[in-house]
Amino acid sequence: MTISRLFIANRGEIAVRIIRAGKAMGIHTIQAYSEGDTEMLAVKLADEAVCVGPAPSRESYLDIKNVVAAAKATNADAVHPGYGFLSESPEFARALEKAGITYVGPSADTIERMGDKVAARQAAEAAGVPVVPGSKGRIATVDQAAKIAGDIGYPVMIKAAAGGGGRGIRIADTEEQLRKLAPQAQAEAEAAFGDGGLYLERSIQAPRHIEVQILGDGTNAIHCYERECSLQRRRQKVWEEAGAVCLDNETREQLCASAVALAKSVNYRGAGTLEYLYDEARNAFYFIEMNTRIQVEHPISEMITGVDLVQEMIRVCDGEPLRLTQADIKPNGHAIEVRINAEDPLMQFLPFPGKVGAMTEPKGEGIRFDHFLYEGYQIPPFYDSLLGKLIAHGTDRADAIAKLRKALNDLRLDGLKTTVPLHKALADDASVQKGAFHTQWLEPWLEAGNLTAATTGGAS
């Protein structure tokens, strides 16, 4: 192995996760941090740490020049970008390549191609992967959008060609709405991503959100089965599962095979995720986008397959061929991950960057808590509210939910308001227990007062 000094260009729980993977491989770890993160757990755990700028992320974690300079100054062989920040920046990957430093991820060309949703859709179609009916490329004018929408049928989803996180998305039920909403979507996309490009897709009503975890070495690729991420609030994932109980085995095999075919067709290197909408009524799945990085929810795929995805992506990006074949990947049981955010779910999810008081981590077989917390740690107000991920792995879905419920009860984070009450209420909900939900299920559930009722013991 040629990577001996690994620079972590991220923060929070994913930085801790990468440090632990690096240490397990005998790699010297170097943690980047901002002036707002001097007391971060990753700084304490890494073999070395270096400041990359002031607290605002645009002046530190998002500053390519600063990050590359810090990696060079610490003689890093490789940089792992984690998720978010620069993890899907082709400019960052190219800057590292120019500096002679290995990027732990796909090539800049692959990031660029698959990060543009229009180009990714075209790549999927070329690989024979089903896509949602929509525009064949970027839309130049509202008149063009109206014509395409008339052809594919309303309702349609107006989407930003670049970026993600639900930004720039509008749904139009009529041509009148389309003509009003398209300029709004364009303006939001331009402001968020510096790219006002749009494309159209038919809006699938009440879909399930299914994604496939893949690993590639630039030539070969395999999958680590699928995850379901349908429980979402404002298009942000809240609760994730591996696998997806709504799929039969034949559909699952077709879905995962399509992901591998697409990964191979773009010479994918590293860990990545292909996201799909699943139309349960039609038993049909459609590719929507690819995330060219490790995902927040990767632990549940690790739990059901026994594969350390972070270690494997370091190996393949170091030039090693895949050590695993598809036959080596055997799914075992069911896993659920819930995101523990520093937010008050009973106060419209108001951010709560407090100080960690007494803390108790849940223990037990099949329980994992990925986080960056310690007693006395002051949560900085500058960044994402994710504190950690609580993962439960059981023999089947009912067992996983039971273990999750116990782990949520055992978790103690004094001094903070967190999303734990939401997850307890979801674990007790009859529809969630039956797996009867979709991407538009959670928000009406919240608006109906179910969380308040579950927390206070009253009727909604």
Image (cartoon, rainbow, N blue to C red):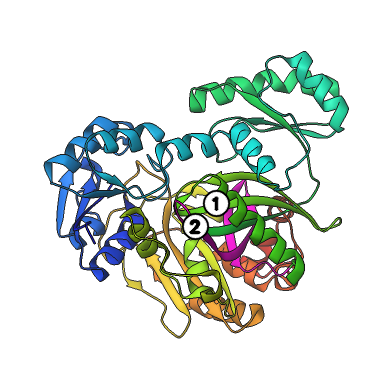
Q: Is residue 231 magenta?
A: yes
Where is residue 72, by image quadrant? top left
Q: Amino acid at mark 2?
A: Asn
Q: Which mark is residue 121?
A: none
As drawn, 149 above or below 238: above
Q: Is residue 294 left or right of residue 435?
A: left
Asked if residue 374 can be seen in this view, the reply is: no
Q: Earlier in the sequence, mark 1 or mark 2?
A: 2
Secondary structure under tag 2 reads loop
Q: Nearer the viewer, residue 111 or 336?
A: 111
Question: Do we see residue 198 in this rendering?
Answer: yes
Rendered location of residue 105, percent (x, y): 39, 48
| 362 relative to 40 in the view: left or right | right
Circle 1/circle 2 CB separation < 8 Å: yes
The span shown in magenta is 216-245
Residue 184 forms part of the magenta stretch: no
Where disc 1 sits, the SS reads: helix
- Measured as percent of width and height from the top left, residue 458 is found at 70, 67
Q: Which residue is mark 1?
A: 264
Structural crowding at the residue carrying mark 2, measured as other residues with C-alpha within 10 Å and reported as few (<14), some (14–19) or many (≥20): some
Picture residue at 67% right of the left edge, 18% below the top: 183
Task: From the image, tell me which residue sits under label 2.
Answer: 220
Residue positioned 60% across, 49% down in the render: 262
Vertical placement of residue 136 versus 227, above or below: above
Residue located 78% across and 51% down the image: 206
Q: Main secondary structure of the magenta part?
A: strand
Q: Quadrant of the C terminus?
A: bottom right
How far apart are the two marked residues, 1 and 2, measured between alpha carbons? 6 Å
Point out residue 261 in the picture as x, y percentages from the top left corner: 61, 53
Q: Amino acid at mark 1?
A: Lys
